[in-house]
Image (spheres, rainbow, N blue to C red):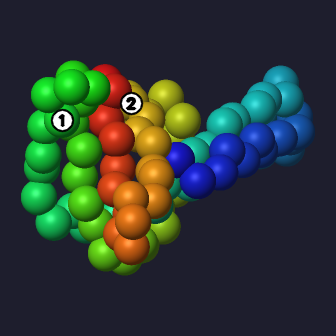
Amino acid sequence: LETIIQVYIPALPSLGREEEDWFALAVVRECPILQQTFHTKLNLNYYPFERMGSRWVYDITCVQCLVGRIKDGNRWILIDRS
């Protein structure tokens, strides 16, 4: 998850929208992973990756889990606690 965007849609009776509404969108960035590794002492999965991928925008209700990103020496890894 990179960003959360809140969108306001006003009431537009001429278009059949009688009430205003708010929507939340999630900007998600892909990270192509190299491998999955399990850290036994910390009891978690981590995933080394080399580069960030494309950005995608979704309805925030589609987001099912979040991961963390940390630098490990000269590489980045994702930590999955879900």
Does residue 28 appear left or right of residue 77 in this picture?
A: right
Three-letter amino acid code of the residue under disc 2? Cys
Residue 58 in the image: state x and y as whole percent. 49, 48
For mark 1, give the secondary structure: strand
Up the image or down, 14 lies above or below 49; here it is above
Q: Are marks 1 and 2 in contact (CB under 8 Å)?
A: no
Near-viewer residue (56 or 9): 56
Regarding residue 16, the answer to whether it shows in the image is: no
Near-viewer residue (57 or 64): 64
Q: Residue at x 52, y 40 (%)?
A: 59
Say few, some or many: other residues with alpha carbon within 10 Å of mark 2 (under 14 / 14 to 19 / 20 or more).
few
Three-letter amino acid code of the residue under disc 1? His
Does residue 49 appear left or right of residue 70 in this picture?
A: left
Q: Which residue is mark 2?
A: 65
- Which comes before the other along the chain, label 1 or label 2? 1
Q: Which residue is mark 1?
A: 39
Residue 41 in the image: state x and y as whole percent. 21, 25
